[in-house]
């Protein structure tokens, strides 16, 4: 699945918020998950290299790392 298909799937099935940085080739994507929509996952989209990094899970006011990893996981 390429990046465009991935984003299209997210938009069709999840609640998505995308912020594109005005002076950098970077976008922050928040995707809502869960039965009540209380869980969010943050992604960084590097538009110059067309890669997405999966970041932290956010739930209400708590933030924790996914699988105790530091930083982001790269997806191409």
Image (cartoon, rainbow, N blue to C red):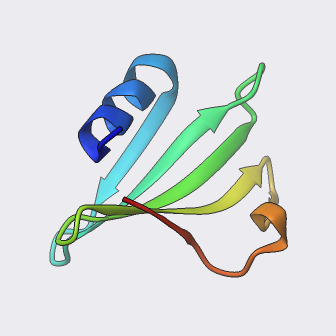
* Residue 11 position by quadrant: top left
* Residue 45 position by quadrant: bottom left
Q: Which residue lies furthest to the front in this view?
A: 1
What residue is shown at x 30% (from left), y 46% (from top)? 3
Quadrant of the snapshot with the N terminus: top left
Give the percent coordinates (x, y) of residue 75. Answer: 45, 60
The vertical placement of 12 against 52, above or below, is above
Q: Is residue 33 left or right of residue 19?
A: right
Nearest the viewer among 49 and 60 is 49
What residue is shown at x 76% (from left), y 75% (from top)? 69
What residue is shown at x 25% (from left), y 39% (from top)? 4
Quadrant of the snapshot with the C terminus: bottom left
Give the percent coordinates (x, y) of residue 30. Answer: 51, 48
* Residue 56 position by quadrant: bottom right
Nearest the viewer among 53 and 64 is 53
What residue is shown at x 45% (from left), y 35% (from top)? 16
Nearest the viewer among 40 and 45 is 45
Q: Is residue 27 left or right of residue 60?
A: left
The vertical placement of 60 against 71, above or below, is above
The vertical placement of 60 against 66, above or below, is above
Give the percent coordinates (x, y) of residue 68. Answer: 84, 72
Q: In this view, does 5 lie to the left or right of 43?
A: left
């Amino acid at each position: 699945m390429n990046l465009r298909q991935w984003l299209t799937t997210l938009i069709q099935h999840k609640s998505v918020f995308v912020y594109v940085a005005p002076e950098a080739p970077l976008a922050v994507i928040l995707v809502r998950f869960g039965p009540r929509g209380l869980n969010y996952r943050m992604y960084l989209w590097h538009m110059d290299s067309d890669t997405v990094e999966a970041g932290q899970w956010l739930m209400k006011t708590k933030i924790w790392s996914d699988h105790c990893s530091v930083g982001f996981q790269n997806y191409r």
